[in-house]
Amino acid sequence: MVITVKEIILSDRFAMKTELIEKASEIITDPPLLINLVSKRVQQLNSGRSPLITMVERMGAADIALTEIIEGKIVLEHGDTEE
């Protein structure tokens, strides 16, 4: 079996996203809330808002949003959740 460079790069990207999701889900433990927060932040980034972190090459908007959550740049206040 021969593994190509492209397959290694793609598997590394998938692994990184999985790692980011796992770390962010430790901070925001409610999955629907995490999804909504990341989705809203991705929309903001795609509309031209600046990232709150130093970007690394090949980071997509979702990677940026997850990293912002992990680094504490985006936080939920108690009034931000519906109960």
Image (cartoon, rainbow, N blue to C red):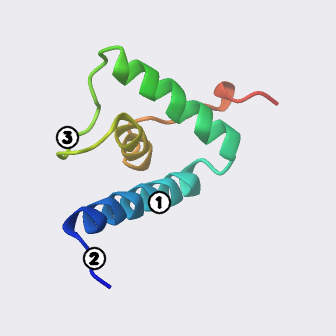
Q: Is residue 10 above or below residue 53?
A: below
- Residue 1 pos. (x, y %): 32, 85
- Residue 14 pos. (x, y %): 40, 59
Which residue occupies 51% across, 35% down? 38
Disc 1 marks which residue? 18
Amino acid type, callout 2: Ile
Residue 15, located in which quarter of the rendered image?
A: bottom left
Would residue 65 appear left or right of 28 to someone viewing this image?
Answer: left
Q: Nearer the viewer, residue 16 or 10?
A: 10
Q: Secondary structure at mark 2?
A: loop
- Contact flag, marks 2 and 1 (Cβ < 8 Å): no
Which residue occupies 29% across, 15% down? 48
Disc 3 marks which residue? 54
Amino acid type, callout 1: Thr
Crowding at dot 2, Cα within 10 Å, few <14 / some 14-19 / many 20+, comes out as: few
Foreground: disc 3 or disc 2: 2
Foreground: disc 3 or disc 1: 1
Which residue occupies 41% across, 43% down? 72
Amino acid type, callout 3: Thr
Which residue occupies 70% across, 30% down? 81
> Which mark, by number, is residue 3?
2
Would residue 68 appear left or right of 31 to someone viewing this image?
Answer: left
Crowding at dot 3, Cα within 10 Å, few <14 / some 14-19 / many 20+, comes out as: few
Location of the C terminus by quadrant is top right
Q: CA distance from mark 3 to mark 2?
A: 32 Å
Name the N-terminal-most of marks 3 and 2: 2
Q: CA distance from mark 2 to mark 1?
A: 21 Å
Q: Secondary structure at mark 3?
A: loop
Would residue 57 appear left or right of 80 to someone viewing this image?
Answer: left
Q: CA distance from mark 3 to mark 1?
A: 20 Å
